[in-house]
Image (spheres, rainbow, N blue to C red):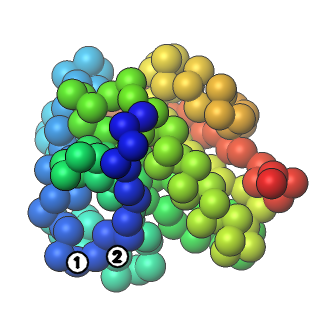
Amino acid sequence: MPVEVTIRPATAKDITELVEIIRNAFYEVAIRFGLTETNCPKHPSNCQPGWIEEALAKGVRYFILDSEGLSCGCVALEQAGPEVCYLERLAVLPAQRRQGFGRALVDHVLDRARGSGSNQVDIGIIAAQTELKEWYQKIGFIEQRKARFPHLPFEVLFMSISIKDDK
């Protein structure tokens, strides 16, 4: 990973930048799984400024990773309950992948979740995206269950990681 890497909290001033990162990072997934605004309007590849505004208003925390003057990725952390957080919208721009940025963002939100008193962080991913599942498993996430939802054209895999005994 380049030396000049920072992860900073995002604010309302960063909404346009967050939308760009999320849309671009999830574009390839949308193409791969045939996800469109019609069959999956809430997929991150269709991200809109209003989504980020609403999330920030309800307390979801976004973080942006900057490297060498470029915003390369982002992630969101939602406090779902007193002991559980959701990791959401992990996104790294395609040209900046395979440099450890995704892992740095995950580590960052795991630390923030731990600091908030949470014992667990949960995620939901496209079940058929096996390489992503394996990536999360290397970090320590464990497959919990799969589910189908009528508004989604794919099966969702829920995974979680216990953070109560870490560090």
Q: Which of 36 and 5 is in front in this view?
A: 5
Which residue is depicted at the point 41% across and 80% down?
Answer: 58
Pinpoint residue 26: horizontal percent, then vertical percent: 26, 36
Q: Do the residues labelled 1 and 2 touch (CB within 8 Å)?
A: yes
Q: How many marks are shown on the rendered structure?
A: 2
The three-letter amino acid code for the residue at tag 2 is Leu
Upstream in sequence: badge 1 or badge 2: 1
Q: In the rendered view, tell whether residue 28 sits above or below residue 24.
A: above
Pinpoint residue 11: horizontal percent, then vertical percent: 28, 76
For residue 97, which quarter of the picture?
A: top left
User: Which residue is identified by label 1?
Assistant: 12
Q: As drawn, is 27 to the left or to the right of 153? A: left
Which residue is depicted at the point 32% across and 69% down?
Answer: 10
Q: As drawn, is 150 to the left or to the right of 120? A: left
The three-letter amino acid code for the residue at tag 1 is Ala
Tag 1 secondary structure? helix
Residue farthest to the right, as pictured: 165
Q: Nearer the viewer, residue 136 or 35?
A: 136
For residue 54, which quarter of the picture?
A: bottom left
Tag 2 secondary structure? helix
Residue farthest to the bottom, as pictured: 57
Which residue is depicted at the point 29% across and 52% down?
Answer: 66
Q: In the rendered view, tell whether residue 79 sits above or below residue 148.
A: below
